[in-house]
Amino acid sequence: MKSKRFLWILIFSLFPQLSSAQNYLGDFSSSADIGPVKHKGLTLYNSKDQIYRLSGSGSNIWFDKDEFHFTYKKLSGNFILRTRAKFIGEGVDPHRKLGWMVRTTTEPSAAMVCATVHGDGLTSIQYRKKEGTHIEEVKCPINAPDIIQLERRGRSFFMSVATYGNPFWTVEIPDFDFPVEMLAGLFVCSHNADIVEKAEFANVRIVIPPDTKFTPYNDYIGSHLEIMEIQTGARKILYSAPNSIQAPNWTPDNKTLIFNSEGLIYRFDLSDNKIDVLPTDFANRNNNDHVLSFDGTMLGISSSSGEAQYGSIVYTVPVNGGIPKRITPLGPSYLHGWSPDGKWLTYTGRRNDKYNIYKILSNGKGDEIKLTDQPTLDDGSEYTPNGKFIYFNSARTGSMELWRMLPDGSHQEQLTDDELQNWFPHISPDGKWVVFLSYLPEVDAQDHPFYKQVYLRKIPLDGGRPKVVAYLYGGQGSINVPSWSPDSRYIAFISNSKID
């Protein structure tokens, strides 16, 4: 049985256009027409691009019964469903529908809730709280959003939608008396029994968050290593692990991603997807603050493998591994930047219970130099490729915002100022863009926790209005370190979910 399954997976990886409702469904387990549709629907999954294409008919999803095409799997407890969706073709009926749906059964009159975008742009969360009753809805003020998210949290469902580039608009519908296990998936409905409509779903993510009683930095869930094309927002999962992997660096030779997991440093080969350990000798308690030199010959790491009273210490090793050389005399110290000429390292250091930004010669000689001096947290320092500025994030104004300064610490200038908490500025190799992590306002300005709904956003190098480039579940460990591809086309990052 295993060999037969492997053969099918091999076939579909070589010929992704063959993936259909009758065989491989990606993250889903079933595909079916709900109700007495006139024309059979179909689900196609392109495993290369990780895109789903659904076609289906059906008279409507409304009143006390539904007709549509549904691709789904069973989910239990809390979950978050997210995609970037669009209709294929002009369509016939302005009320054709696509989106996410959660149902109790496949019966046409089943209790359900769905995040729905219509062909004319009307968007709403529609729901039938009990089997056989008429659907209710709450309409959204955003017309024709393409980012669609449906979340189950306890007895509530949340619909969040956005036009790509903008933050979510969210509404909560409470008091669903639904069973623990539900059918959850993508749908398309033509709203015309005689017509078949088509829809495309990209960046599909099914997120299972941690249990509510999990302990941060002690309990972990799974991880997806992802890359994303900045211009288009197209994402691809390269590797998934049931444990915590964090903070991918992209090597300047475009061959490898480097990340940390459970104290060790790993290499992911982009040509064959193979993973091996990057040897760091005695340093086996490495954290997610590791940085490559601009020439790609050296790796700086932050590790608690040295003197216990200091905690994290900065070391350097050759890019292929070796015995770490200690750089910072004091700790805790968390590495974030390497100067383009290779001479300086910048890092966040806790001294006298205050976290500020320091720099030190990369050969470990000389004293550390304090660049910022604030009672609040300064973090995430990174040089621009021309060495002119150091970018960083600071909570000195009451919220976490992006700043920059000259390499000697002078002329400190604020770049962002909005309702989100902004962390870890990363400058593209061509020196044009800054990508950073943004938490929602309810997260404390000086905290960067795991397992939150966050955005990756970008601004021009000199500042400007932030644009969302990725909607994800993550936070700590997602993008702590420089992770641009050398051609400035892609970034690498980690998203999170429980993974069986």
Image: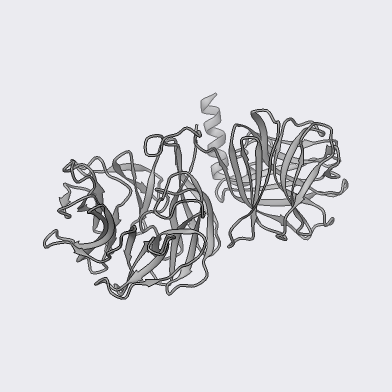
Residue at the location (25% across, 66% down)?
A: 371
What is the count of numbered marks?
0
Residue 181 x %, y %? 64, 29
Residue at the location (39% across, 48% down)?
A: 477
Residue 319 x %, y %? 24, 53
Q: Can the viewer see residue 428?
A: no
Residue 233 x %, y %? 55, 59
Q: Is residue 281 above or below residue 94?
A: above
- What is the basis of the colouring in this image? one colour
Q: Is residue 77 above or below residue 226?
A: above
Q: Is residue 45 above or below residue 168?
A: above
- Seen in the image, is 53 located left or right of residue 237? right
Quadrant of res 130? top right
* Residue, far left: 365
Quadrant of res 179? top right
Q: Can the viewer see residue 309?
A: yes
**Which quadrant of the rendered structure holds the N terminus?**
top right
* Residue, far top: 1
Residue 443 x %, y %? 47, 51
Q: Is residue 407 above or below residue 357?
A: below
Residue at the location (49% across, 72% down)?
A: 464
- Seen in the image, is 386 located left or right of residue 194? left
Depth check, front residue: 366 or 186: 366
